[in-house]
Image (cartoon, rainbow, N blue to C red):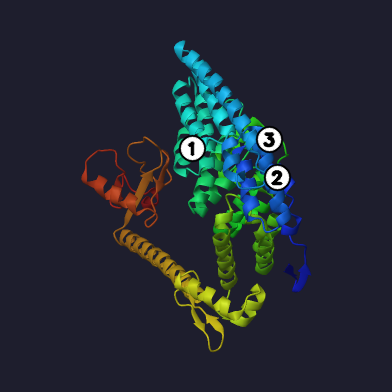
């Protein structure tokens, strides 16, 4: 893969060539359904025969260890390694275990012990889940919710229902129980809010609501999700959040994702509570530490924030074979890559009004015909500008979007300044007219500055805290004075005339 760095191509080894299946699958719980589903997905879609064969072997080993006879018969019945004798013996043994668990449930129901009934239902659910009977596990786990006696037990059951619903791809039930679990909590589980956000993010991702999914994944704060490996690993959360953010979020949010954490690596319960209060900010601050687990994804984000779009796209393209083997991300890889590419083109075009397509095609490593079709789609969607036009004869792209925006901003600022200036001139003119009228009629007005004082002192510099009112400084005060002049003795500020010596200005006596 060639990456453009400072105008010089740089060769890096393919990321897909270093794919280690055992390391990758070791992130998940050894007996979890998601581990088995990921192994089967990789076995069916891996282009490397060695990786595919290893995935089949690991999946068969997990089925044998967990006694998952139903899935074993479904998958391996047509393969040479199928062991019918083991399947029959294991089915008989698990049937005896099922009868024992059902007997415990019957005994608990006969004693009307709610705690024992709940525990028996959960044991049955775990038994069915290990055997791959997810629908039966869902049925008994839902029944156990009726016997929960506190919020912690209710939150635990809701979490089990969400995990089973994710394995069954029943995302409507995932969202339903996420909303129910938000009103509960599990004691001593600081990751419980993060698990709810992961479940919501997977549901939004499956439905193609990428922006909502990105918000959920980047808002995950707190310690690493080492106790949620039955669904996802910490690396999965970072990968999903980074790709979705790269496709949907602003450049400022991506820059914040790359910033290192200002605090230490340890996370206390108070820190987790503060992060939960502002989940998006806390999640963005903690994304930098998670990105250290996936250097290629971190480098792709850094290339985008530095406007090195070709390097970003080339690095993501080298990741594509590995992303195509992800159980949840594979159906959306092509769409996400198209959105990221279109976003790069849109950001690339923002500073320009006229641009040659051949230079742009060289910067992105695309041929001219492909670039023209992509730009035509963006122009039709209005993402480049309503007035953008592609000249196929001169191979140029012209847009007046930026010029119109600048002219609109300048016009708006000019109108705002004119409005402020007109109000200032009118106020000044009004104040001058009032003052000239007062001087013409030998009028002097004083206002008492003392709170609660009635009347005013007769002298301009006399006692009582009185002071002159200057026309033009307070027009509302003048209206109050005129209104007070009509009443007799309401405590309003009096109007003083020059002819009245008792209420006049002392300077007029000399």
Please tell me which residue lies in front, 111 or 262. 111
Circle 1 SS class: helix
Marks 2/1: CA–CA distance: 35 Å
For residue 57, which numbered disc appears in the image?
Answer: 2
**Tag count:** 3
**357 is higher (above) or lower (below) than 246:** below
Marks 1/3: CA–CA distance: 24 Å
**395 is higher (above) or lower (below) than 21:** below
For residue 267, which numbered disc appears in the image?
Answer: 3
Please tell me which residue lies in front, 388 or 471. 388
Please tell me which residue lies in front, 20 or 480. 20
Residue 290 visible in the snapshot: no
Q: Say which label, 2 or 3, has the lower sequence index.
A: 2
Q: Say which label, 2 or 1, has the lower sequence index.
A: 2
Quadrant of the frame with the N terminus: bottom right
Residue in the picture at 46% in, 68% down: 413
Residue 81 x/y as whole percent: 68, 44
Q: Which residue is mark 1?
A: 178
Q: Nearer the viewer, mark 1 or mark 3?
A: 1
Q: In the image, 505: left or right of 150? A: left
Circle 2 SS class: helix
The 10 Å Cα crowd at callout 1, few under 14, some 14 to 19, many 20 or more, is: many
């Amino acid at each position: 893969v060639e990456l453009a760095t400072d105008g010089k191509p740089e060769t890096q080894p393919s990321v897909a060539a270093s794919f280690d299946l055992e390391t990758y699958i070791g992130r998940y719980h050894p007996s979890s359904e998601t581990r088995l589903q990921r192994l089967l997905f990789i076995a069916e879609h891996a282009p490397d025969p060695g990786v595919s064969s290893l995935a089949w072997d690991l999946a068969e080993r997990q089925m044998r260890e967990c006694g998952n006879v139903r899935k074993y018969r479904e998958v391996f019945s047509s393969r040479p390694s199928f062991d019918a004798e083991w399947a029959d013996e294991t089915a008989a043994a698990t049937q005896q275990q099922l009868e024992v668990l059902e007997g415990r449930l019957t005994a608990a129901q006969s004693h009307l012990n709610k705690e024992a009934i709940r525990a028996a239902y959960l044991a049955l659910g775990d038994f069915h889940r290990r055997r791959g009977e997810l629908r039966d596990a869902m049925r008994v786990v839902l029944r156990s919710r009726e016997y929960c006696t506190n919020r912690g037990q209710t939150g635990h059951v809701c979490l089990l229902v969400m995990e089973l619903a994710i394995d069954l791809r029943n995302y409507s039930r995932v969202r339903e129980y996420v909303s129910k679990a938000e009103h509960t909590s599990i004691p001593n589980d600081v990751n419980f809010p993060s698990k709810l956000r992961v479940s919501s993010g997977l549901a939004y991702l499956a439905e193609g609501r990428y922006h909502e999914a990105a918000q959920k994944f980047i808002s995950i704060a707190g310690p690493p999700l080492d106790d949620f490996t039955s669904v996802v690993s910490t690396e999965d959360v970072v990968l999903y959040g980074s790709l979705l953010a790269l496709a949907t979020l602003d450049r400022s949010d991506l820059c914040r994702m790359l910033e290192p954490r200002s605090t230490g690596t340890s996370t206390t319960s108070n820190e987790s509570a503060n992060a939960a209060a502002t989940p998006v900010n806390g999640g963005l601050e903690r994304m930098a530490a998670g990105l250290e687990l996936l250097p290629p994804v971190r480098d792709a984000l850094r290339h985008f924030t530095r406007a090195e779009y070709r390097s970003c796209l080339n690095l993501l393209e080298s990741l594509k074979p590995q992303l195509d083997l992800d159980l949840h991300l594979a159906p959306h890889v092509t769409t996400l890559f198209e959105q990221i590419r279109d976003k790069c083109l849109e950001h690339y075009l923002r500073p320009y009004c006229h641009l040659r397509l051949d230079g742009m095609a060289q910067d992105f490593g695309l041929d001219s015909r492909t670039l023209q079709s992509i730009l035509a789609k963006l122009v039709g969607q209005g993402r480049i500008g309503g007035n953008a036009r592609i000249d196929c004869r001169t191979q140029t792209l012209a847009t007046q979007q930026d010029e119109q925006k600048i002219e609109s901003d300048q016009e708006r600022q000019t109108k705002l300044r004119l409005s402020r200036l007109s109000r200032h001139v009118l106020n000044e003119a009004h104040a001058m007219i009032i003052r000239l009228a007062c001087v013409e009629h030998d009028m002097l007005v004083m206002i008492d500055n003392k709170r609660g004082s009635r009347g005013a002192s007769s002298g301009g510099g006399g006692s009582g805290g009185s002071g002159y009112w200057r026309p033009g400084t307070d027009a509302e005060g003048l209206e109050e004075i005129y209104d007070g002049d009509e009443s007799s003795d309401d405590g309003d500020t009096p109007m003083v005339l020059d002819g009245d010596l008792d209420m006049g200005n002392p300077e007029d006596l000399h």
